[in-house]
Each structure stands twice: as C-alpha cells, then as structure tokens.
Amino acid sequence: MAADFVCDCCVRAREVLCGGALRSEESIMKQGTAKRSIYGVHPGVAMTIKWIGELKQKTGRTLEEWMKFIKKEGPPTEEARRVWLKEQHGLGTNSAWWLAERSAGKGEEMGDPDAYLETAEQYVEKMFAGKKEHLRPLYDALLKLGLKTGKDVKACPCQTIVPLYRNHVFAQIKPTTQTRIDFGLALGDIRKTPKQLIDTGGLAKKDRITHRFEITSPKDIDDEVKRWLKVAYDRDS
C-alpha cells in the first residue's frame, strides 16, 4: 500500500489484510465478544487466532511453549529473535515475525477479539490527541457516514488509520496532518472524477485505496463525498 494508507495492524501481521478480502470470522463468532463497541473486530484477529491454534501442529510447540523457549534460549532483541527463529529454527517469515513480536510483549490484542476492541478505541483516542484533537468531530462525522452506507460495513481501527470494510476495505479515514483528514476510497480504474477527488496513484501500485478527499472542515463532507463513498461501497459487492 502507499505510505498514506498502510494499516498498522496489517503491517504487524505481515500481510496486507486491509487490501484483501475479509477472512473467515467463524472462530471469532464461536468465541464471541463480551465487549460492545461501535467498531468491528479486525480480520487480522481471526487470522491470528487460527495461526495460534495451528502452531503446535506446524511447529511442534504451542504459543506458550515458544514464549518460554525464546525468552530462555533466544537473543535479547525482537529483531535478533526474528532472524534467529528463521535461521536457527526454520520458521517462515510470518511466524518468526509474530513470535518475536509476542515475545517482546507486543501484538497480544490481535489474538483476542475483546482485547482488540478495547485497543481499537485507544488507537482512535491517540490518533486524535494533542494537536489533532480538533479533527475529532470530522472523524466522527466521516465514521458515521461510512457506517450508514450499509448494514454490512464495519470500521476496524489501527494505529494511524481507520479502514472501513464491506468484503474488502472500500474506504479509509486518516488524520494525515494537523489540519487535514484524508478520506480514501477504493475506486479502481475509474477515470472521470471531480477535481477534489485526488488520484493517489494507488491503482498503479496495486493498492486498494486509489483516490482521496481532503477533509479540513464540515463543509468538505458534501454530496460529492457521499456520492463517491457509495460508489466505492457498491464496487465491493
């Protein structure tokens, strides 16, 4: 993805889930979530739960066993542990990355739906703290607009962006600067667009997000924004 539209959750998962289809969430639904939230569970959580469940069969150790082993026998830093797990223990890039991250006390929320939802709200609070606090009403308006687009829409916050999913990511909310939110849309190869709908170059880079509106005030959330949001939603049917 382009730098402006990289999902932190996906980077940490070592796959661009925000650019791909929603993964099966059967395991999450069976497990259930006690927490009620305006946000939905990120599809990366389902993938992580599946990975944890298959770890013993694929690697010979459970997650807990790997954590004990890494902390006892492995090198001291997360980066060195990734290399050690790949070179000394034959693990793939994704597994080595995840295990090293978990051994450093990171990414635990991606293995538990309730923990993710709690962390998701913290992501948004931090995203709009300090000098970006005044952008929060614009974010709230865009989030409300996005969720109203369809009953099958969910927002799954990451550290720096809030992707909106239908079957794939079809829109993203990102406080890019202290004065502006970029409202990104997945519009593919559509060519005839209004001047204020900026081409991100995403199509050439094979990104989901291909266009964006610059939102600096409530008046920027106009009929054109609503129209093209609906186009992006309909394209993801």
Image: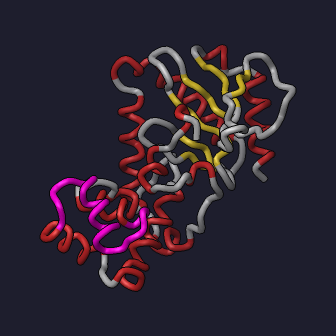
User: Can residue 169 be found in the magenta stretch?
Assistant: no
Nearer to me, 160 or 55: 55
Residue 87, given in percent of the width and then of the height, sits at: 32, 68
Question: In the picture, which quadrant includes the N terminus?
Answer: top right
User: Against 170, is 63 above or below?
Assistant: below
Q: Which residues are magenta?
A: 74-95
Does residue 41 appear anywhere in the picture? no
Nearer to me, 220 or 207: 207
User: Against 186, is 29 above or below?
Assistant: below
Residue 124, given in percent of the width and then of the height, sits at: 42, 36
233 relative position to 57: left or right: right
- Point 36% across, 48% down: residue: 119
Q: How many marks?
A: 0
Which quarter of the figure has residue 229?
Answer: top right
Which quarter of the figure has residue 160?
Answer: top left
- Point 41% across, 40% down: residue: 159
17 relative position to 160: left or right: right
Nearer to me, 201 or 176: 201
